[in-house]
Amino acid sequence: MRAFMVSCKTKGEIDLMREAGKVVGQTIEEVAKYIKPGITSEELDKIGEEFIRSRGMIPAFKGLYGFPGSICISFNEEVVHGIPGKRVLQEGDIISLDVGATNKGWNADGAATFPVGKVSEEALKLIAVTREATMIGISQMKLGNHLYDISDAIHDYVEKQGYSIVTQYVGHGIGRKVHEEPQVPNFRQPVRGMALRKGMCLAIEPMVNIGTFETVVKEDKWTVVTKDGSLSCHWEHSSAITDGEPLILTLP
Ligand code: MG
């Protein structure tokens, strides 16, 4: 039996996280305007960092566990944690932007995946399925449900679409720290887990692959890629549990 230390946030704390989340959503929108063949991921990172700082907030990932960038930018078969660098975006790539912002000590974390120019039908479907899997997971964030109802709903949907779900990386609680308890797996669990409570804030972030669910970490010790090199997609929102519908914190 594992004991969880899960904190429920107050209205005031959630307001601060919503402010952070708004900037996360706006940063993703802003950086996405520059997603075109020819730009480097390093340039996108700089645009994102400047945007977050212009709003008086701190890029939450900069230096987190030693991460060198402000935004995680992952290409194609890269699942998550891509380091911004000299790699140039090419027509047909898909690019995920994973952004965190800290507002007066409170965090929000969100991600989205975008096509670069014209991409394959398959890539577009993968993006649509991953986004929908996120929203399906969030829709389970209500009183009366248990933690792993979220996991089961995401897994069921992704599997029905014929894709696989990454199991080595999971969603998480969020608040004063970017990563808090509980972990939120995106795959089915043998039990329902803890009962959800008002004020719990969770980042739901399915990572969906066209091929195998298995992943490996590249030599840079950060970038996670699919083991078979197949395309991967990532989407994420931080949300708070309320008396009614979940409050999505990371919408622009
Ligand atoms: Mg996250």
Image (cartoon, rainbow, N blue to C red):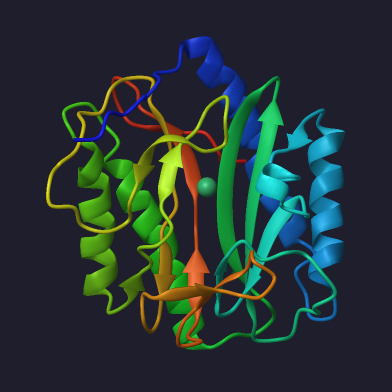
Q: Position of residue 5 (x, y in %)?
A: 36, 24
Residue at 82% x, 47% y is 49
Residue at 49% x, 39% y is 238
Q: In the image, is residue 25 above or below residue 132?
A: above
* Depth order, front residue of 85/65: 65
Numbered label tally:
0
Q: Quadrant of residue 113?
A: bottom right
- Left or right of 176? Residue 70 is right
- Left or right of 109? Residue 48 is right
Q: Position of residue 101 (x, y in %)?
A: 68, 37
Q: Position of residue 92 (x, y in %)?
A: 65, 86
Residue at 38% x, 67% y is 166
**Image quarter in which the C terminus is found:** top right
Q: In the image, is residue 154 above or below residue 18?
A: below
**Residue 203 showing in the rendered view:** no
* Depth order, front residue of 166/159: 166
- Left or right of 51? Residue 197 is left
Q: In the image, is residue 189 above or below residue 231?
A: above
- Left or right of 158? Residue 65 is right
**Residue 138 showing in the rendered view:** yes
Q: Position of residue 147 (x, y in %)?
A: 25, 38
**Image quarter in which the N terminus is found:** top left
Residue at 31% x, 51% y is 136
